[in-house]
Image (cartoon, rainbow, N blue to C red):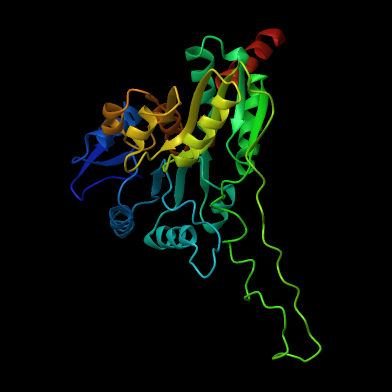
Amino acid sequence: MFCVAPPELEATMNVTKGGLVLFSANSNSSCMELSKKIAEDVNTTIMELLIMVYACKTSCAKSVTGVIPYFPYSKQCKMRKRGSIVSKLLASMMCKAGLTHLITMDLHQKEIQGFFNIPVDNLRASPFLLQYIQEEIPDYRNAVIVAKSPASAKRAQSFAERLRLGIAVIHGEAQDAESDLVDGRHSPPMVRSAAAIHPSLEIPMLIPKEKPPITVVGDVGGRIAIIVDDIIDDVDSFLAAAETLKERGAYKIFVMATHGLLSSDAPRLIEESAIDEVVVTNTIPHEIQKLQCPKIKTVDISMILSEAIRRIHNGPCAFLTHSHLTAAGEESEHQL
């Protein structure tokens, strides 16, 4: 049984061959559209998902698999000051409600999988984004993959290696929201003297960070700049990166991200910016944002979600790929 994260409590049940049941909601057309593509689900309220999972569990479902393309609160996956690790809380709630398997896509940190005591399939959207670059950007061979901060360098390197392109990293004065200044590692409070603890004990002070002026490590002059990240929500950092790249000579700027939250006035800011195109997947509905900003493009990833559901439901035999079947056939013919 598969619960596709839905918007309102009223839900549609689709029964397929082999006993697979797919639940989706009626109130959101975007959820219905993606669910239809998976069955022929998409992100919504956590509480409804928990209620649906618990309802399936108490109805004696053999297994309950949650399909959550965008895992909410994924950025809150480590301690910041005295805050809570919300991703861990969500994982515990889902497991307690009765979830037996989770399908998600591009978790902000892969370590989030360790918060669950059930199997987690963390799918990748990069093949779809790479395909878009190769097919929709005619002169992509003259492009350079850009990380808008050192924290995004690993993802940018992965894209660059697959496309056989160069890489550039923006480093500088913009404060990184995930720096170690806010993750609780400076606790207990910084004090020079610890005489209250012991007269002879002195705790060294943590030297504050001082960011240098913005620097682009890599050559972007006369080239297409493709900024890659996993989430695009507050676009300020992307706009600042685009302006920097323009100043360094990039003549086209693309932004590629798996999850397009695009909240608040992000569409308007993108439309007025130096960014030429923002490409996101449909893990989150953003039809309204696309109407407000023609620069926003969507890549459909329903195919990989439907394939993951099929393989989990059908068992290990479903993981025999076409290449394996072809190789087996060739071996049989050779033996004959």
In the picture as drawn, the residue positioned furthest to the right comes out as 200
Residue 46 falls left or right of residue 82: left
Residue 280 to residue 60: above or below: above
- State the image quarter where residue 16 is shown: top left
- State the image quarter where residue 280 is shown: top left
Residue 195 visible in the picture: yes
Q: Going 69% across and 28% down the picture, which residue do you hit?
A: 218
Q: In the image shown, does 134 or 240 lie closer to the viewer?
A: 240
Give the total of numbered labels. 0
Residue 221 to residue 243: above or below: above
Residue 30 to residue 23: above or below: above
- State the image quarter where residue 201 is shown: bottom right
Q: In the image shown, does 138 or 306 lie closer to the viewer?
A: 138
Q: Going 36% across and 37% down the picture, which residue do you hit?
A: 266
Q: In x, y percent, where is residue 262?
A: 37, 38
Q: In x, y percent, where is residue 103?
A: 45, 43
Q: In the image shown, does 201 or 40 lie closer to the viewer?
A: 201
Q: In the image shown, does 258 or 15 lie closer to the viewer?
A: 258
Residue 2 falls left or right of residue 165: left
Q: Going 39% across and 31% down the picture, which residue do you hit?
A: 270
Q: In x, y percent, where is residue 246?
A: 54, 25
Residue 320 visible in the picture: no
Residue 241 to residue 91: above or below: above
Q: Quadrant of the C terminus?
A: top right
Q: Quadrant of the N terminus?
A: top left
Residue 335 falls left or right of residue 135: right
